[in-house]
Amino acid sequence: MDKEQIKEEIIKKLRRTIGVTPDEASNEDIYVAVSCTVRDLVMDRWAEANKQVHHSGNKRLYYLSAEFLMGRALTNNMINLELYDAYRDALGELGFDLDRIEEQEADAGLGNGGLGRLAACFLDSLSTLEMPVTGCCIRYEHGLFRQLIEDGEQHEAVDNWLEHGNLWEIARPEDTVEVRYGGHIEEVWTDTGVSFKHEGYTSVVAYPYDMPVIGYESKMPATLRMWQARAKTKLDMKNFNRGDYARAVEESALVEAISQVLYPEDNHHQGKLLRLKQFYFFTSASMQFLVRRHKKFHGDVRTLPDYYTIQINDTHPTLAIPELIRILLDEEGLSWDEAFDIAFRMFNYTNHSIMREALERWNENLLKELLPRIHKIITVIDQKLRESIWQKWPGDWSKIDELAILNRGEVHMANLCIAVCGRVNGVSQLHANIIKTQTFRDFYVLYPEKFIGVTNGITIRRWLAKANPALTAEIESRITRSFLKDYRDFEKLRNWEGNAEFIEAAARVKQENKERFAAYLEAKQGSVIDPHTMFDVQAKRLHEYKRQLLKILHVLCLYFRVKDNPHTFMVPSTFLFAAKAAPGYYMAKEIIRLIHSVAWLIDSDPAVRDVLKVVFIEDYNVSVAEQLMPAAEVSEQLSTAGLEASGTGNMKFMLNGAVTIGTMDGANIEIYDAVGEDDIFIFGARAEELRAMDRLCSYDPRAVYDANPELKRVVDSLVSGVLPVASNKQFHDIYNALLHYGSHKADRYFVLHDFASYDKEFTKLMAAYVDRDKWKAMSARNTICSGIFSSDRTIHEYNEMVWHLKAIE
Ligand code: 26W
């Protein structure tokens, strides 16, 4: 389509779908009309592609994930259809600004953080690589909460992303399935053996909506299938007729609660019944649908593994395994051996966190009561696993204790995954090694061939072409646009390494992006920042292991230095924080409060506020990240070594030319390998050092504190009264977490330990920053070396090692 055709189509949609003329249309009307025209184009390709997969018998990936953090669709789709410029011009001629139109769309915030955003990037890459995939998740009525800051504290408001409807989804009533909970299992004996009858259950309707996700110039859009929970009958007429209206709708409300809301805990497992219902809900629906579709096109369930491969995104969708086995046994009449064999060939599992509190374990009785048949199947898998453990380590009960699925009244989901899945992967090289040598050490002895590492990636369509069009233009004018389709072409940028013109051009773009971001932030929340200061950014979920605390304590340290000595060397800096804390995570919320307190302290001090500024960016989400990444100059990646599985924000910053200051953790290590020691700032203890300290209980934070007067002053200020706080509430709990508790538990995340090392490296970073030519070259080199972090490369590796899909011709 060209500009004129686009104008025509938009006007037609305005008239026919909305009933307004262009001169009467609001931004929202235009958003709807424009989206409909883009959707039409996506739909055409989607229909063709799905038909081709069904008939060609190409293998399809089912990517099961409790979260898909999609963000907005409209302009991303335009870019991937290579129609962005045409649309922008067409709209301009109609008197509309595409940037304003874009803002009409609510973010699809169906995820917490890294795991959910990774799933979204994967769909874009899979489609770009023309590989067939269906992502399966829950259609949460409310995604991740909106963050409000009042008096420096986080409050939560409900996310209403569906309020104005969702143009990107299509209901598929014909694919509705039923999911059953509770009840009991009757054994029925016949001549041919035993079969099982589920009785007394409660059923929930799983109602699907599909969203097409189109990659760059793709003929194979991905499908995101979102399941909504519905009651079989909305209204219980018996109660209604008796006049009991509340009771009449009560049951349906209870049922529909299943897809009401995304749980906001990240990296922290709590065994809530509703959450277990959610997980079974979408995995059961997805497996029933998969089997149904397979039978429709290919007949025999025994050939399932030839047509489908399934990826389990962390353990949340684990119940898909016993659910598929249940369908094969109870509904398709296969034997245990046949059903197991099929499951063993279809499932794979990605681990995303080694934090103890992230490992999912469910109370066995809870699971048994909610899902009696699934429990029974898990018992049989557990039995099989125990047999292989016993064979490997005869007589060693401690191994069984550690590796069994059912143990001490709990169901260990990771163990179930590893027992059944063909491949188990970590998400960075370090993380894959930790999994093999620590977290799942004995499993690695039992099944060495299963364990692999596939380093995460990010889609360069969204995180470069969409977020940073100016930098994209500079790159494209040198190496053409082909890298958007073929990630290997990004390497051509290496020829521009050290090229003064490219370096200057990238620096000019960075400055413009900083200015645009400053304007954006002022409009968004009234914060005024100076685009001529250094933009230093830490943006990620708030978690103690990510150590936002280390950063803010260091800012306090800088504050005291400037205050004591106005001539101290200091790069005028803006420290930007963006982070949501889980609503029930007290320490994380305290850290948000502290960041605001330090911001106020500096703002109120004329001696310091011209060189230092702290701003907390409210309500961080995908769309905010798209504005932020291109403007960042310093990327803060401070996690305690060994605890950040990969990180993907680190890659987004690098791609956009920010220089990393970070620990040797997760993918930071691979960023270091890619860019080389001169263009990154590495600090802090290594993972092995910290492990040794943990093992020997040799870390003494108080000794660190006593030995460093500057650090002591900073820590003391948490409780001394110098920090401005609402209602006189100081920061005793943070202070105590650093110094007190039983000695072995104080400063669990080694903040004080790494403080001096961070400070030293930050000083080096500031020296590099003022050497303008040097810094610009560093920044450009970070972009140039970031090609391996394309999620297209990640998908390529999964495909070689795990899925073996064929691209559609
Ligand atoms: C059950 C509670 C719970 C909820 C979410 C446990 C664990 C999670 C996620 C797996 C946490 C998560 O998002 N992990 C992040 O995954 C990213 C993608 O692989 C990595 O880049 C991050 O390092 C990792 O923290």
Image (cartoon, grey):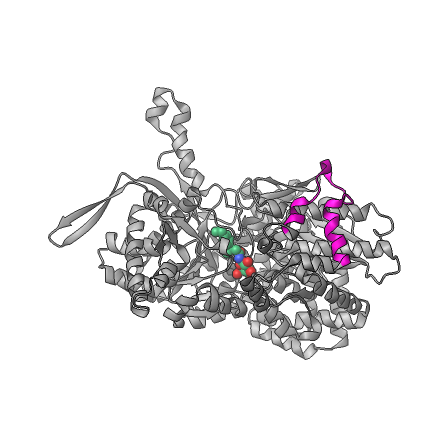
Which residue occupies 43% across, 42% down?
A: 274
Q: Quadrant of residue 545?
A: bottom right
Q: Relative to 645, say whether 378 is above or below.
A: above
Which residue occupies 37% across, 54% down?
A: 320
Q: Quadrant of residue 656?
A: bottom right
Q: What x and y, as percent, mark residue 145? A: 57, 43
Q: Quick check: can you spot residue 666? A: no
Q: What x and y, as percent, mark residue 263? A: 50, 45
Q: What residue occupies the far bottom of the structure in this picture?
A: 495
Q: Relative to 422, say whether 752 is above or below.
A: above
Q: Relative to 96, say whether 781 is above or below.
A: below
Q: How many marks?
A: 0
- Of the pair 219 and 733, the residue shown nearer to us: 733
384 sits left or right of 622 in the view:
left
Q: Is residue 728 magenta?
A: yes
Q: Quick check: can you spot residue 296? A: yes
Q: What x and y, as percent, mark residue 778? A: 73, 71
Q: What residue occupies the far left of the structure in this picture?
A: 191
- Of the pair 541 and 106, the residue shown nearer to us: 541
Q: What residue occupies the far right of the structure in this picture?
A: 567
In the image, the segment drawn in magenta is: 709-737
Is most of the magenta stretch helix, strand or loop?
helix
Quadrant of the rendering where the N terminus is positioned: bottom right
Q: What residue occupies the far top of the structure in this picture?
A: 243
- Of the pair 2 and 462, the residue shown nearer to us: 462
Quadrant of the rendering where the C terminus is positioned: bottom left
- Of the pair 650 and 766, the residue shown nearer to us: 766
Q: Is residue 269 magenta?
A: no
287 sits left or right of 193 in the view:
right
Q: What x and y, as percent, mark residue 533? A: 80, 58
